[in-house]
Image (spheres, rainbow, N blue to C red):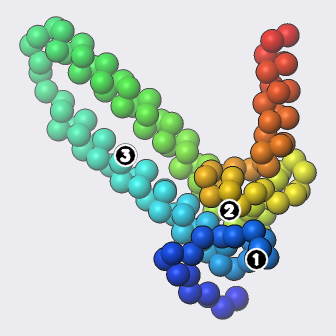
């Protein structure tokens, strides 16, 4: 097993160090785990809020407004659930040594892109090609 590197809280990956070295891997793992933890905590708060909020509202307009708010909250939580799944996939890629590399080309994904979207599986160029191809197929 590799020795654990201590990661400075102020550390940010830079282009002039070896790509996906131990420090970068630890940085992205921590970033993903923190993000996942925040999402899970938000979900727990939503569930508790919905359980507490299950009340009888006599005014039809107020009840409709509350139901609309709940529907929006549930859609948001569903998107977050899907995001947690993508975070788990990124963590698996870290474990398998595939994190940070484009699934289309095998080339490194830019650190700037990974820092902004650590669940990215494609380089910006490959993602743009993919989206253009999707758009062409949608329009035909």
Q: Which secondary structure lies at badge 1?
A: loop
The residue wearing badge 3 is: 43
* Residue 26 lies in quadrant: bottom right
Q: Earlier in the sequence, mark 1 or mark 2?
A: 1
Cα–Cα gap, marks 1 and 3: 37 Å
Determine the residue positioned at 50% across, 43% down: 81
Horizontally, residue 110 falls left or right of residue 37, namely: right
Q: Is residue 93 visible?
A: no
Residue lying farthest to the left in this orientation: 58
In the displayed structure, would residue 12 be above or below residue 113?
below
Q: Residues within 10 Å of mark 3 (few under 14, many from 20)?
A: some
Residue 37 location (% of width, % of height): 43, 59
Q: Secondary structure at mark 3?
A: helix
- According to the picture, the residue beneath numbered tag 2 turns out to be 92
Q: Is residue 91 left or right of residue 106?
A: left
Residue, x 82% and y 53% (percent of image)? 102
Q: Position of residue 57 (x, y in %)?
A: 12, 18
Q: Nearer the viewer, mark 1 or mark 2?
A: 1
SS at badge 2: helix
Residue at the image point whose x is 28% and y is 19% from the top: 67
Q: At x 75% / y 61%, what residue is drawn?
A: 100
Circle 1 residue: 17
Disc 1 crowd, CA 10 A, few/some/many (<14, 14-19, 20+): few
């Amino acid at each position: 097993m590799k020795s654990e590197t201590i990661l400075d809280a102020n550390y940010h990956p830079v282009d002039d160090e070896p790509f996906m070295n131990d420090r970068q891997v630890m940085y992205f793992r921590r970033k993903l785990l923190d993000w996942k933890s925040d999402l899970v905590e938000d979900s727990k708060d939503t569930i508790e809020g919905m359980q507490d909020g299950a009340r009888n509202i006599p005014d039809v307009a107020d009840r409709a407004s509350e139901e609309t708010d709940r529907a929006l909250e549930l859609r948001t939580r569903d998107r977050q659930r899907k995001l947690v799944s993508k975070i788990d996939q990124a963590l698996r890629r870290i474990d398998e040594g595939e994190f940070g590399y484009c699934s289309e080309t095998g080339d490194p994904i830019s650190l700037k892109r990974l820092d902004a979207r650590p669940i990215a599986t494609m380089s910006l160029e490959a993602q743009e090609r993919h989206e253009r191809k999707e758009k062409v197929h949608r329009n035909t």
